[in-house]
Image: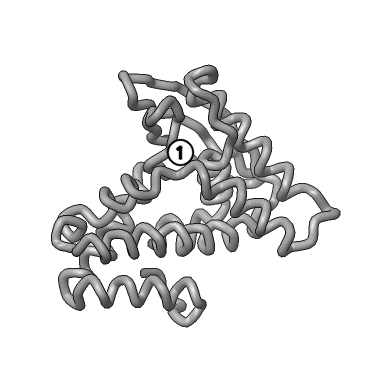
Amino acid sequence: MPKIIHSLHIVLVLVCAAWSGSIAAAEASPTEEIRNAVDAVLALLKDPNLQPETRRKGIRKAIAPHFDYRAMSQSTLALSWKKATPAQQDRFVELFPKMLENVYIVAMEEYSGETVKYGKEKIQGKRASVETFIVQPNGPEIPIVYRMRLKNDRWLAYDVVIEGVSLVSNYRSSFRRIADVEGMDALLEQLQQKIDGRLKNDA
């Protein structure tokens, strides 16, 4: 995913932040949830007294509960999800978040004072989108749209669009290629290798 990971490292800081906030049952708008989440995660990044491992644990703890990982996994795999066995599906749902967290933790450590401003919010039933812009100290603003859904009275993020590029779509393309050519078990093995640090290239 060179467009997202290589050239826009800081984007993932705020992607993670948007997924990490405390979610109250329809009491706050999607934009308010993102704003609160960004503030919470950036506080961890700015705290000079935190040891790196303590900071990473705090970030993981903040992120993990607020993804709709199964829905995100199903959308990412697309047709490959339907072809996978239930055991393979469960394994993917287990590994995919771990890989994402590792990518995000590395990206967060690239933080260098960026801020975020908020644009339009659209709510249609149980779906919402929130427009934001990352403001770089010495660069152009980066537009990001968060896609969220209301599930069991909680707003959960299931995709993010960075400069017109969907995070889910990027992974879908690369994962589909591996699953189609090498098989689902090979994709799972590559995810495990990437988590373990044995596979350096993007999945």
- Image: 27 above or below 72: above
Residue carrying label 1: 144
Residue located 50% across and 32% down the image? 132
Q: Quadrant of the C terminus?
A: bottom left
Q: Give coordinates of residue 67: x percent, y percent.
A: 45, 44
Residue 183, position as x, y percentages in the image:
19, 74
Q: For numbered disc 1, what is the local secondary structure?
A: strand
Q: Residue furthest front?
A: 87
Which quarter of the image is occupied by the N terminus?
Answer: bottom left
Residue at (66, 57) in percent of width and height = 57
- Please give left or right for residue 113 compared with residue 128 in the image: right
Q: Residue at 14% across / 61% down in the picture? A: 83
Looking at the image, which residue sits at the far bottom? Answer: 198
Residue 165 image offset from top left, x and y in percent: 35, 47
Q: Residue at x 25, y 57 (%)?
A: 77
The quarter holding residue 52 reads: bottom right
Q: Amino acid at mark 1?
A: Ile
- Left or right of 174: which side holds 69? right
Q: Residue 161: in sight, yes or no? A: no
Instruction: Sort mark 1 into few (<14), some (14-19) or many (20+) by Cα contacts within 10 Å.
Output: many
